Image (cartoon, coloured by chain):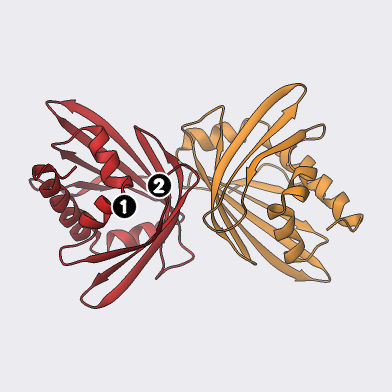
Chain colours: A orange, B red
Amino acid sequence: MTTTTTTDDSATIEAVENMPAITISRDFAATAAQLVRAHTDPDVVLQWLGPEGTTSTMDYWDARSGGSWRYVHTIDGEDYAFHGCFHTVSEDRLVQTFTYEGFPDSVALETMTFEELGDGRTRLHTQSLFDSYEARDGMLASGMEIGVNDGYAKLDRLLAADAL
Amino acid sequence: MTTTTTTDDSATIEAVENMPAITISRDFAATAAQLVRAHTDPDVVLQWLGPEGTTSTMDYWDARSGGSWRYVHTIDGEDYAFHGCFHTVSEDRLVQTFTYEGFPDSVALETMTFEELGDGRTRLHTQSLFDSYEARDGMLASGMEIGVNDGYAKLDRLLAADAL
């Protein structure tokens, strides 16, 4: 694995060897239940997802197994839309599909699991499995780590403010 | 790629090199629209999916982008249940998630495309992308080719009977 980001408070973002996949891990001062809520409650999701300066709107969001979702990020006046379906929504595991509509034929399968570390901390593990190496490498080259780390920093602030 | 099945009328089932994926291709005496209907109309799906001798029932089936599905195959008195969500349902492309409930934590992402060959024939291309090589290799070792080829032979008969 190649670690592309390892600085303090940053997520660990790795390209998986021999799989068109990216793994992300990040520790939070939160319970697993709070992190599940951060990824499923639309009012919470809208507050942290995306780079600093993002305004987000939900088109639809039905966070249950078999539901679907679509949201739009507005950044510097430009709209970026994303959509997918929820394969699994449970207390310890989220599995969903993910398409950035700028590349409408590319689909990733995202799996999130929640590892409780004790002392009120939980490690979020995400695997994004892409349908080609080109799609995976394009995502890694896109500056995704800015969005990931900015978003998680916003989530840290929501948790510190007892907003979850 | 390793071709595991190449006999007449059989689907070509291949393990993809360097991806935890299986591709299947199969020609039909059908239009793309008929093959899309064969994979989306629940009354048609129930008539051909699975090995010879399968009785199938739909639990739910909502074949639109963002919908979900679950069906049960009964074979020799044993039930085998499967479920997923539809990421894309369009005239030329179907993308859906797929879980066999015997391995409930394993999820595959299936993409089907339809290549019209002329003379009323269409080649169905399926890629099943698994979340691990173990899951992919387990599927290849499961006798899947029997279910695939039996199902497609039943679909051939439906097409020959103008049932689509």
Quadrant holding the C terminus of chain B: top left
Q: Is residue B150 above or below residue A76?
A: below
- Kindly identify which residue carries mark 1: B42
Nearest to the observer: residue A3 or residue B67: B67
| B159 relative position to B49: left or right | left
Where is residue B86 shown, x and y percent of the image?
45, 47
Quadrant holding the N terminus of chain B: top left
Outermost residue to the right: A161
- Kindly identify which residue carries mark 2: B63
Question: Under tag 1, what secondary structure?
Answer: helix
Nearest to the observer: residue A105 or residue B62: B62
Residue at the location (87% across, 55% down)?
Answer: A163
Q: Chain of mark 1?
A: B
Q: Residues within 10 Å of mark 1 (few under 14, many from 20)?
A: some
Q: Are marks 2 and 1 in contact (CB under 8 Å)?
A: yes
Q: Given the image, on which type of amino acid does mark 1 rest? A: Pro
Where is residue A114 shown, x and y percent of the image?
67, 63
Q: Which mark is residue B110?
A: none
Residue at the location (80% across, 65% down)?
Answer: A121
Q: Given the image, on which type of amino acid does mark 2 rest? A: Ala
Where is residue B34 shown, x and y percent of the image?
23, 38
Residue at the location (14% across, 29% down)?
Answer: B120
State the separation of the CA atoms marked 2 and 1.
8 Å
| A98 relative position to A133: left or right | right
